[in-house]
Image (cartoon, rainbow, N blue to C red):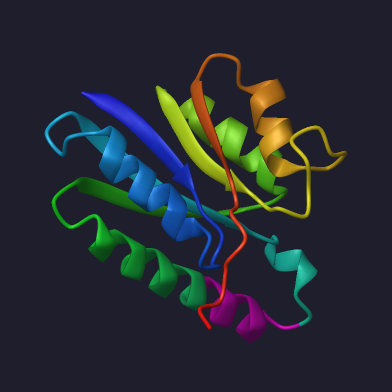
Amino acid sequence: MKKVLLPVDISDRALKSLERAKFEFDPSEVEITLVTVMNSPMHYKYDHEFAHELHRRQKKLESYQKILDNYEVTTSVLCGKPGVSIVRFAKQNHFDCIIMTRSKKESAEAHGSVSAYVAKKAPFLELMILNEESQRRSA
């Protein structure tokens, strides 16, 4: 069974990663983990702000999990710097593959790009980094 990690933010571009995973893998072939990264508790002025953000992200992961309803899916919210947290989590949990999107605002080589960091620091993984396509409005 292949272990696939889908780091997602809480924007609509995360849906692209979900759709790609469904296209690439049969439900019987993979275990998928959806993960999002948020600031650590010390970045919040009040505990209730951290708790609110944690709850919001957990709810978003649950909604993404429903999209993958035929798949074995687990979710996790990590705290810290996104690139570092994703690579550490992938290594500790022995993932085979990461599917993630990058913002159209950043090139794959951009300084500080999460996708560039993951590509550089996780050579032990098969990576699929998807470009965010610009949305076109219908007239």
Foreground residue among 134 and 87: 134
Looking at the picture, how far across and down is residue 139, in whole percent? Answer: 53, 83
Residue 80 relative to residue 22: left or right: right
Q: Which residue lies furthest to the front in this view?
A: 139
Q: Assess whether residue 51 is covered by the magenta stretch.
A: yes
Foreground residue among 133 and 62: 133
Name the image quarter holding residue 105: bottom right
Residue 101 relative to residue 55: left or right: right
Q: Residue at x 78, y 41 (%)?
A: 107
Quadrant containing the N terminus is top left
Name the image quarter holding residue 31: top left
Q: Which residue is drawn at 11% across and 33% down?
A: 28
Foreground residue among 23 and 117: 23
All told, the count of numbered labels is 0
**What span is in magenta?**
46-54
Residue 4 relative to residue 1: left or right: right
